[in-house]
Image (spheres, helix red, strand yellow):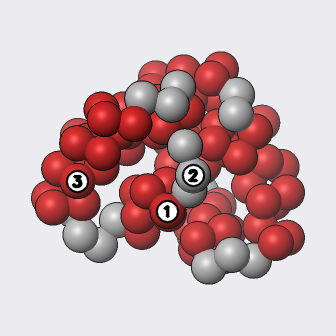
Amino acid sequence: MTDVNDENDEAAVLLRLIGADPAANDEVLALVPGTRSASVLTAAALLSRDPDMLARAAQLALAPRERQLVALADAHLHGQADLFDGLVRDHLSEHPDHLLAAWIASRPL
């Protein structure tokens, strides 16, 4: 079972990453070994360009919103610009409050 404090800590680190806190990059990567968060693994995969982390995120992504996040991150990671544009546009129209998806969209392909 995941501790609520761990989830809150991970969410706080992700918010700092999205807010461009330079220390957050290393902190997200440090969370990878013990996390059960698809969002943390997705962010880490993009920071490290490691498709294995994204595969692990896909295994943990249970909700449609998480599965969509992993799919758009996969398109981004593989430089599939047209697919990425469509996925991120659809995702953000359904989930306009999804800051991590918006952060991914702001990153260069």
Task: Determine the secondary structure under disc 1.
Answer: helix
Mark 1 vs 3: CB contact within 8 A: no
Residue located at (62% from left, 79% from top): 19
Which class describes the residues within 10 Å of circle 1: few (<14), some (14-19), or many (20+)?
few
Q: Secondary structure at mark 2?
A: loop
**Residue annotated with mark 1:** 106
Q: Which residue has dot 2 on it?
A: 108
Q: Is residue 9 left or right of residue 102?
A: right
* Of the pair 47 and 15, the residue shown nearer to us: 47
Who's the residue at 70% across and 28% down the image? 50
N-term-proximal mark, 1 vs 3? 3
The answer to whether marks 2 and 3 mark residues whose Cβ atoms lie closer than 8 Å is no
Give the amino acid at mark 3: Arg
Q: Which mark is residue 85?
A: none
Q: Position of residue 59 (x, y in %)?
A: 46, 23
Graded by Cα atoms within 10 Å as few (under 14), some (14 to 19) or many (20 or more), the crowding at tag 2 reads few
Q: Which residue bears the numbered disc 3?
A: 89
Mark 2 or 3, nearer chain start: 3
Residue 7: percent from the left, percent from the top? 57, 61
Decide if residue 61 is in sight here. Answer: no
Q: Residue at x 15, y 61 (%)?
A: 93
Foreground pick, 82 / 25: 82
Say which quadrant the C terminus sits in.
Answer: top right
Q: Amino acid at mark 2?
A: Pro
